[in-house]
Image (cartoon, rainbow, N blue to C red):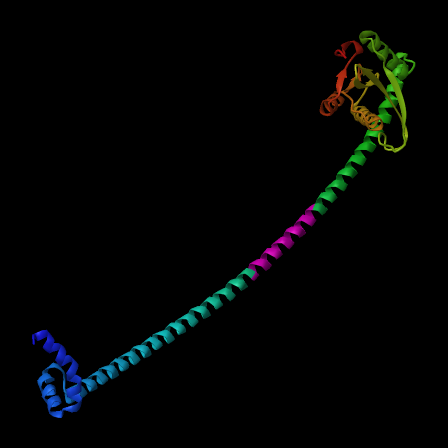
Amino acid sequence: MNAEALKEAIRQELPHFLRTDPDFRAYILELTRREYAGREETQDRFYEILAELRRDREEQTQKWQEQNRKWDEHQAEQREEFAKLYEQLNHDREEQARKWDANQEELRQLHQASEEHRAEQARKWDANQEELRQLHQEIMAQTLKHDRGIGALGSRWGLQSEKAFRDALATILEKSFNIQVLNVNEYDDRGEVFGRPDQVELDVIVHNGSLIICELKSSIDKAGMYIFERKARFYEKRHQRTANRLMVISPMIDARARKVAEQLGIETYGDSILVESL
Protein backbone atom coordinates (compact mmCIF):
# COMPACT_ATOMS: atom_id res chain seq x y z
CA MET A 1 0.00 0.00 0.00
CA ASN A 2 1.46 3.32 -1.04
CA ALA A 3 1.33 6.57 0.96
CA GLU A 4 -1.65 8.06 -0.83
CA ALA A 5 -3.76 4.92 -0.28
CA LEU A 6 -2.78 4.93 3.40
CA LYS A 7 -3.84 8.61 3.80
CA GLU A 8 -7.16 7.87 2.23
CA ALA A 9 -7.78 4.88 4.49
CA ILE A 10 -6.92 6.90 7.63
CA ARG A 11 -9.20 9.78 6.46
CA GLN A 12 -12.10 7.35 6.13
CA GLU A 13 -11.57 5.34 9.32
CA LEU A 14 -10.30 8.08 11.68
CA PRO A 15 -13.71 9.51 12.64
CA HIS A 16 -14.93 6.03 13.61
CA PHE A 17 -11.85 5.31 15.76
CA LEU A 18 -12.11 8.66 17.52
CA ARG A 19 -15.71 7.95 18.48
CA THR A 20 -15.27 4.32 19.51
CA ASP A 21 -11.69 4.03 20.85
CA PRO A 22 -10.91 6.29 23.84
CA ASP A 23 -7.25 5.33 23.97
CA PHE A 24 -6.80 6.07 20.34
CA ARG A 25 -8.64 9.37 20.73
CA ALA A 26 -6.37 10.33 23.67
CA TYR A 27 -3.33 9.40 21.63
CA ILE A 28 -4.50 11.60 18.74
CA LEU A 29 -5.32 14.50 21.09
CA GLU A 30 -1.89 14.24 22.74
CA LEU A 31 -0.29 14.01 19.35
CA THR A 32 -2.09 17.16 18.03
CA ARG A 33 -2.05 19.21 21.24
CA ARG A 34 0.65 21.49 19.89
CA GLU A 35 -1.53 22.41 16.96
CA TYR A 36 -4.30 24.06 19.05
CA ALA A 37 -4.78 25.74 22.41
CA GLY A 38 -6.02 23.93 25.45
CA ARG A 39 -9.18 24.72 27.41
CA GLU A 40 -7.47 26.88 29.98
CA GLU A 41 -5.59 28.74 27.33
CA THR A 42 -8.76 29.05 25.32
CA GLN A 43 -10.64 30.35 28.36
CA ASP A 44 -7.88 32.82 29.11
CA ARG A 45 -7.98 33.99 25.56
CA PHE A 46 -11.76 34.22 25.71
CA TYR A 47 -11.57 36.39 28.82
CA GLU A 48 -8.93 38.51 27.18
CA ILE A 49 -11.19 39.01 24.19
CA LEU A 50 -14.07 39.84 26.52
CA ALA A 51 -11.85 42.32 28.32
CA GLU A 52 -10.81 43.84 25.00
CA LEU A 53 -14.43 44.00 23.93
CA ARG A 54 -15.33 45.65 27.26
CA ARG A 55 -12.52 48.15 26.86
CA ASP A 56 -13.58 48.80 23.29
CA ARG A 57 -17.15 49.30 24.44
CA GLU A 58 -16.07 51.69 27.15
CA GLU A 59 -13.92 53.55 24.69
CA GLN A 60 -16.82 53.67 22.25
CA THR A 61 -19.08 54.81 25.08
CA GLN A 62 -16.61 57.54 26.00
CA LYS A 63 -16.28 58.50 22.38
CA TRP A 64 -20.07 58.52 22.04
CA GLN A 65 -20.43 60.61 25.16
CA GLU A 66 -17.72 62.95 23.89
CA GLN A 67 -19.50 63.14 20.55
CA ASN A 68 -22.80 63.84 22.33
CA ARG A 69 -21.09 66.53 24.39
CA LYS A 70 -19.66 68.11 21.27
CA TRP A 71 -23.06 67.81 19.58
CA ASP A 72 -24.73 69.49 22.55
CA GLU A 73 -22.13 72.22 22.46
CA HIS A 74 -22.64 72.61 18.71
CA GLN A 75 -26.41 72.75 19.20
CA ALA A 76 -25.95 75.37 21.91
CA GLU A 77 -23.71 77.40 19.58
CA GLN A 78 -26.27 77.05 16.79
CA ARG A 79 -29.08 78.16 19.08
CA GLU A 80 -26.98 81.13 20.18
CA GLU A 81 -26.20 82.03 16.56
CA PHE A 82 -29.87 81.66 15.63
CA ALA A 83 -30.81 83.87 18.57
CA LYS A 84 -28.30 86.51 17.45
CA LEU A 85 -29.51 86.23 13.85
CA TYR A 86 -33.13 86.55 14.94
CA GLU A 87 -32.23 89.57 17.05
CA GLN A 88 -30.36 91.10 14.08
CA LEU A 89 -33.32 90.43 11.81
CA ASN A 90 -35.64 92.13 14.27
CA HIS A 91 -33.24 95.05 14.49
CA ASP A 92 -33.02 95.28 10.68
CA ARG A 93 -36.80 95.09 10.41
CA GLU A 94 -37.18 97.87 12.94
CA GLU A 95 -34.54 99.91 11.09
CA GLN A 96 -36.33 99.37 7.79
CA ALA A 97 -39.60 100.38 9.41
CA ARG A 98 -37.94 103.53 10.76
CA LYS A 99 -36.50 104.36 7.31
CA TRP A 100 -39.91 103.69 5.74
CA ASP A 101 -41.57 106.06 8.18
CA ALA A 102 -38.85 108.65 7.50
CA ASN A 103 -39.32 108.28 3.73
CA GLN A 104 -43.07 108.59 4.08
CA GLU A 105 -42.61 111.73 6.15
CA GLU A 106 -40.20 113.11 3.56
CA LEU A 107 -42.69 112.32 0.78
CA ARG A 108 -45.44 113.99 2.78
CA GLN A 109 -43.29 117.07 3.23
CA LEU A 110 -42.41 117.06 -0.48
CA HIS A 111 -46.08 116.74 -1.34
CA GLN A 112 -46.88 119.57 1.02
CA ALA A 113 -44.08 121.65 -0.49
CA SER A 114 -45.41 120.83 -3.96
CA GLU A 115 -48.88 121.90 -2.92
CA GLU A 116 -47.44 125.10 -1.49
CA HIS A 117 -45.48 125.62 -4.71
CA ARG A 118 -48.63 125.15 -6.78
CA ALA A 119 -50.47 127.54 -4.50
CA GLU A 120 -47.63 130.04 -4.89
CA GLN A 121 -47.73 129.62 -8.67
CA ALA A 122 -51.48 130.14 -8.59
CA ARG A 123 -51.00 133.32 -6.55
CA LYS A 124 -48.35 134.52 -9.01
CA TRP A 125 -50.68 133.69 -11.90
CA ASP A 126 -53.51 135.67 -10.31
CA ALA A 127 -51.09 138.53 -9.66
CA ASN A 128 -49.90 138.44 -13.27
CA GLN A 129 -53.47 138.36 -14.49
CA GLU A 130 -54.26 141.36 -12.32
CA GLU A 131 -51.16 143.11 -13.64
CA LEU A 132 -52.20 142.32 -17.22
CA ARG A 133 -55.69 143.56 -16.48
CA GLN A 134 -54.29 146.80 -15.15
CA LEU A 135 -51.93 146.99 -18.14
CA HIS A 136 -54.90 146.42 -20.44
CA GLN A 137 -56.76 149.19 -18.72
CA GLU A 138 -53.73 151.44 -19.11
CA ILE A 139 -53.43 150.48 -22.78
CA MET A 140 -57.09 151.23 -23.34
CA ALA A 141 -56.69 154.55 -21.61
CA GLN A 142 -53.62 155.33 -23.74
CA THR A 143 -55.49 154.24 -26.84
CA LEU A 144 -58.34 156.60 -26.13
CA LYS A 145 -55.88 159.37 -25.33
CA HIS A 146 -53.91 158.89 -28.58
CA ASP A 147 -57.09 158.48 -30.58
CA ARG A 148 -58.16 161.87 -29.37
CA GLY A 149 -54.71 163.28 -30.11
CA ILE A 150 -54.61 161.79 -33.60
CA GLY A 151 -58.08 163.15 -34.25
CA ALA A 152 -56.97 166.61 -33.23
CA LEU A 153 -53.76 166.31 -35.30
CA GLY A 154 -55.70 165.11 -38.30
CA SER A 155 -58.04 168.06 -38.04
CA ARG A 156 -55.04 170.40 -37.81
CA TRP A 157 -53.49 168.87 -40.97
CA GLY A 158 -56.75 168.99 -42.79
CA LEU A 159 -57.22 165.22 -43.00
CA GLN A 160 -60.85 164.18 -43.32
CA SER A 161 -60.58 160.93 -41.29
CA GLU A 162 -58.39 157.95 -40.38
CA LYS A 163 -60.31 155.98 -43.00
CA ALA A 164 -59.13 158.32 -45.73
CA PHE A 165 -55.51 157.77 -44.66
CA ARG A 166 -56.03 154.02 -44.55
CA ASP A 167 -57.58 153.98 -48.00
CA ALA A 168 -54.60 155.86 -49.38
CA LEU A 169 -52.12 153.34 -48.01
CA ALA A 170 -54.25 150.44 -49.27
CA THR A 171 -54.39 151.91 -52.74
CA ILE A 172 -50.60 152.17 -52.89
CA LEU A 173 -50.27 148.50 -51.86
CA GLU A 174 -52.78 147.32 -54.42
CA LYS A 175 -51.09 149.23 -57.24
CA SER A 176 -47.55 148.21 -56.21
CA PHE A 177 -48.21 144.48 -55.88
CA ASN A 178 -51.36 143.93 -57.93
CA ILE A 179 -53.30 142.65 -54.93
CA GLN A 180 -56.52 143.45 -53.11
CA VAL A 181 -56.54 144.73 -49.55
CA LEU A 182 -59.72 143.55 -47.83
CA ASN A 183 -61.09 145.55 -44.91
CA VAL A 184 -62.59 143.08 -42.42
CA ASN A 185 -64.97 144.25 -39.73
CA GLU A 186 -66.10 141.54 -37.29
CA TYR A 187 -67.84 141.64 -33.93
CA ASP A 188 -65.88 140.41 -30.92
CA ASP A 189 -68.72 139.25 -28.69
CA ARG A 190 -66.36 137.87 -26.01
CA GLY A 191 -64.26 141.01 -25.66
CA GLU A 192 -61.00 139.22 -26.48
CA VAL A 193 -59.44 142.28 -28.13
CA PHE A 194 -60.65 145.30 -26.18
CA GLY A 195 -61.73 143.62 -22.97
CA ARG A 196 -65.38 144.14 -23.83
CA PRO A 197 -67.59 143.20 -26.82
CA ASP A 198 -66.85 145.50 -29.73
CA GLN A 199 -66.24 145.68 -33.48
CA VAL A 200 -62.79 144.59 -34.64
CA GLU A 201 -61.51 146.15 -37.86
CA LEU A 202 -58.37 145.13 -39.71
CA ASP A 203 -56.99 144.68 -43.21
CA VAL A 204 -56.31 141.29 -44.78
CA ILE A 205 -54.30 140.33 -47.85
CA VAL A 206 -54.58 136.84 -49.37
CA HIS A 207 -51.90 136.37 -52.01
CA ASN A 208 -50.64 133.10 -53.52
CA GLY A 209 -52.10 131.13 -50.61
CA SER A 210 -50.42 133.36 -47.98
CA LEU A 211 -52.37 135.28 -45.36
CA ILE A 212 -51.09 138.74 -44.40
CA ILE A 213 -52.83 140.78 -41.71
CA CYS A 214 -52.19 144.52 -41.91
CA GLU A 215 -52.73 147.61 -39.81
CA LEU A 216 -52.85 150.79 -41.97
CA LYS A 217 -52.85 153.88 -39.75
CA SER A 218 -51.67 157.46 -39.78
CA SER A 219 -49.84 156.78 -36.48
CA ILE A 220 -49.48 153.98 -33.96
CA ASP A 221 -48.12 153.78 -30.45
CA LYS A 222 -47.15 150.97 -28.08
CA ALA A 223 -50.74 150.35 -26.99
CA GLY A 224 -51.94 150.33 -30.59
CA MET A 225 -49.29 147.73 -31.47
CA TYR A 226 -50.53 145.44 -28.67
CA ILE A 227 -54.13 145.97 -29.85
CA PHE A 228 -53.17 145.08 -33.43
CA GLU A 229 -51.51 141.87 -32.26
CA ARG A 230 -54.65 140.93 -30.33
CA LYS A 231 -56.83 141.73 -33.34
CA ALA A 232 -54.64 139.48 -35.51
CA ARG A 233 -54.89 136.61 -33.02
CA PHE A 234 -58.64 137.16 -32.82
CA TYR A 235 -58.88 136.83 -36.61
CA GLU A 236 -56.70 133.70 -36.65
CA LYS A 237 -58.81 132.09 -33.96
CA ARG A 238 -62.09 133.09 -35.60
CA HIS A 239 -61.08 131.72 -39.03
CA GLN A 240 -58.88 128.82 -37.82
CA ARG A 241 -55.93 130.00 -39.88
CA THR A 242 -52.47 131.29 -38.94
CA ALA A 243 -51.19 134.43 -40.63
CA ASN A 244 -47.92 134.16 -42.53
CA ARG A 245 -47.02 137.80 -41.80
CA LEU A 246 -48.21 140.60 -39.52
CA MET A 247 -47.59 144.07 -40.92
CA VAL A 248 -48.04 147.63 -39.65
CA ILE A 249 -47.75 150.52 -42.15
CA SER A 250 -47.71 153.99 -40.65
CA PRO A 251 -45.60 157.12 -41.16
CA MET A 252 -45.67 157.78 -37.41
CA ILE A 253 -44.61 154.71 -35.40
CA ASP A 254 -43.66 155.41 -31.81
CA ALA A 255 -40.18 154.14 -30.82
CA ARG A 256 -41.67 152.03 -28.02
CA ALA A 257 -44.16 150.59 -30.47
CA ARG A 258 -41.29 149.46 -32.72
CA LYS A 259 -39.75 147.53 -29.80
CA VAL A 260 -43.08 145.86 -29.14
CA ALA A 261 -43.36 144.97 -32.84
CA GLU A 262 -39.91 143.35 -32.78
CA GLN A 263 -40.88 141.28 -29.75
CA LEU A 264 -44.18 140.19 -31.32
CA GLY A 265 -42.73 139.46 -34.79
CA ILE A 266 -44.61 142.31 -36.48
CA GLU A 267 -43.12 143.96 -39.56
CA THR A 268 -43.21 147.77 -39.54
CA TYR A 269 -43.01 150.14 -42.55
CA GLY A 270 -43.18 153.92 -42.76
CA ASP A 271 -44.85 153.87 -46.18
CA SER A 272 -46.60 151.39 -48.47
CA ILE A 273 -43.91 151.72 -51.12
CA LEU A 274 -41.32 150.44 -48.62
CA VAL A 275 -43.09 147.10 -48.14
CA GLU A 276 -41.03 144.10 -49.14
CA SER A 277 -42.35 141.93 -51.95
CA LEU A 278 -45.46 139.96 -51.13
Residue 263 picture quarter = top right
Seen at 17% across and 86% down, the residue is 16
- The residue lying furthest to the front in this view is 1
Principal secondary structure, stretch drawn in magenta? helix
Left or right for 104, reference 21: right
- The residue lying furthest to the bottom in this view is 22
Q: Nearer the viewer, residue 91 or 252?
A: 91
Left or right for 208, reference 62: right
Left or right for 53, reference 244: left
Q: Position of residue 255 (x, y in %)?
A: 74, 20
Residue 172 picture quarter = top right
Q: Is residue 216 visible?
A: no
Q: Quadrant of the N terminus?
A: bottom left
Seen at 20% across and 87% down, the residue is 47
| Residue 13 lies within the magenta run | no
Q: Is residue 18 visible?
A: yes
Q: Is residue 267 above or below residue 237?
A: above
Q: Nearer the viewer, residue 263 or 183?
A: 183
Q: Position of residue 23 (x, y in %)?
A: 11, 92
Point out the stretch of residues depicted in magenta. 97-117
Count of labels in the image: 0
Seen at 84% across and 32% down, the residue is 192
Q: Nearer the viewer, residue 52 or 59?
A: 52
- The residue lying furthest to the right in this view is 160
Left or right for 186, reference 81: right
Q: Position of residue 125 (x, y in %)?
A: 74, 40
Q: Position of residue 124 (x, y in %)?
A: 73, 42
